[in-house]
Amino acid sequence: MQQAPQPDDRSLSELFTDLSRELTALVRQEVALAKTEMSDKAARAGRNAGVLAVGGAIAYAGLLALVAAAIIGLAHALAWWLSALIIGVLVVVIGVGLMWTGFAALRHADLIPHRTVQTLKEDAEWAKRQMT
């Protein structure tokens, strides 16, 4: 029955070989974690984008009907061209405000894989301790 060598009995080359093997395994695990974390975030963002697109298309159809109704209603008091102009400007102002809000939200979206970044920092500290 053969016993595993004690850490003190290993040569320097064996220690470096073990360290290299462990670092390689660690890097592979970190890459796998990053892939998993990013695919989860991408899948969630994709689902949300799909719901947003469908909701936007339905809302757009309703908005067109409301705009037409507003133009027709205002045309009873003003000229057709003037009622269309007033409603058109109002719709553009609302649309630009919504776009501004959407762009601001996208700028603040958090797409950084925080767990992976944290474990990479921990791994770097571990590797430093192993070298000393």
Image: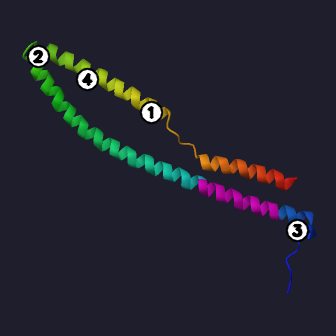
Circle 1 residue:
105
Q: Residue at x 25, y 19 (%)?
A: 90
Q: Residue at x 83, y 64 (%)?
A: 17
Please tell me whether residue 17 belongs to the stretch shown in magenta. Answer: no
> Horizontal placement of 4 versus 106: left or right?
right
Q: Residue furthest bottom?
A: 1
- Give, as a three-letter code, the residue at label 2: Trp
Considering the numbered disc 4 on the image, is that residue within a helix, a strand or a loop? helix
Residue 58: give its label. none
- Give, as a three-letter code, the residue at label 4: Val
- Give, as a three-letter code, the residue at label 3: Pro
Circle 3 residue:
7
Q: Residues within 10 Å of mark 1 (few under 14, many from 20)?
A: few
Which of the marked residues, 1 or 2, is nearer the chain's N terminus? 2
Q: Spatial distance from mark 3 to mark 2, Cα to Cα?
A: 90 Å
- Give, as a three-letter code, the residue at label 1: Ala
How far from the left and from the top, in percent, is residue 71? 14, 22
Mark 1 or mark 4: which is in front? 1
